[in-house]
Image (cartoon, rainbow, N blue to C red):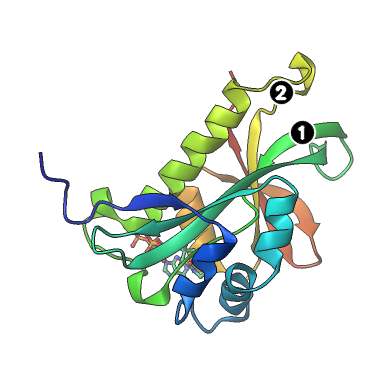
Amino acid sequence: MTDHPHQLYAIEFTEAEQVRLVGFSCGDEPWSKHVTEWILGSDVLESMKRGTRVWLFETAQAEIVGFGSVGTSVWQWPPPKGERTTIVLIPMLGIDARFRGQPPDPDWRYSRQLMSHLIAEAQRVAREWSGDAEKKPSWLVLMVHQDNARAIHFYEQCGFELIPDVLRRQDHKVMKLWIGD
Ligand SMILES: CC(C)(COP(=O)(O)OP(=O)(O)OC[C@H]1O[C@@H](n2cnc3c(N)ncnc32)[C@H](O)[C@@H]1OP(=O)(O)O)[C@@H](O)C(=O)NCCC(=O)NCCS
């Protein structure tokens, strides 16, 4: 069976893959530049040392469309003042600006394929949790710049909800998706 022409393939990211990212750019907005710098620089490597897994998403022609990451963290939950709880976190994700909104068919939209992979990985982390049962994570969490309306809209389409009245890093909203039993 031949795969659909817009099928993306997830490749586990390692430091050696960084050379392939020359020219990769998520766009010119300040938050987009930050995302590009994260994957091209040392931040991604530091995050991987803390247990984050990172994937590149590429077409059948090996064009890199974007990247995504999943890790765990201990947060006060619900933020800002709840009990210390393990959550699954998406530290960073981005799509090369050339591929935003592509392809037009929403069933094959690259952003959705990328997020489906990250949600499935987050669910797997929760399902295969080997630590204390009461610390098993139930929420997938991400932070998004409050002015990044495109990303917020996209995350809401994927089922994430904004947590009202909570800001992290001064200007980032927190969004959550239930991945518990
Ligand atoms: C966030 C990102 C991954 C989303 O991928 P994408 O391909 O742009 O997303 P999509 O086009 O599938 O979805 C965005 C939706 O928001 C809509 N949208 C676009 N601009 C918008 C705006 N200013 N306000 C509200 N909605 C907007 C789009 O129309 C689309 O909705 P639709 O599918 O109903 O038309 C991508 O834009 C990106 O990498 N941006 C730069 C880096 C970044 O911000 N990363 C996230 C850090 S938290």
Q: Is 117 on the left or on the right of 90, as rendered?
A: left
**Which quarter of the figure is the C terminus placed in?**
top right
Residue at (43, 49) in percent of width and height: 157
The amino acid marked with disc number 2 is Lys
User: Label 2 vs label 1: CA separation?
Assistant: 7 Å
- Which is more toward the observer, 29 or 19? 19
- Which is more toward the observer, 77 or 67? 67
- Which is more toward the observer, 153 or 6? 6
Quarter of the rendered structure image containing ligand 1: bottom left
Residue at (66, 48) in percent of width and height: 52
**Which quarter of the figure is the N terminus placed in?**
top left
Residue at (65, 73) in percent of width and height: 41
Q: Is 43 on the left or on the right of 76, as rendered?
A: left
Task: Please identify the residue farthest to the left as the structure is shown.
Answer: 1
Residue 153 percent across, percent down from the top left = 48, 58
Q: Which residue is mark 1?
A: 86
Disc 2 + disc 1, Cβ < 8 Å: yes
Residue at (45, 72) in percent of width and height: 20
Which element type, helix, strand or loop, lies under badge 1? strand
Q: Which residue is mark 2?
A: 136
Of callouts 2 and 1, the N-terminal one? 1
Q: Is 80 on the left or on the right of 99, as rendered?
A: right
Residue 116 percent across, percent down from the top left = 42, 42
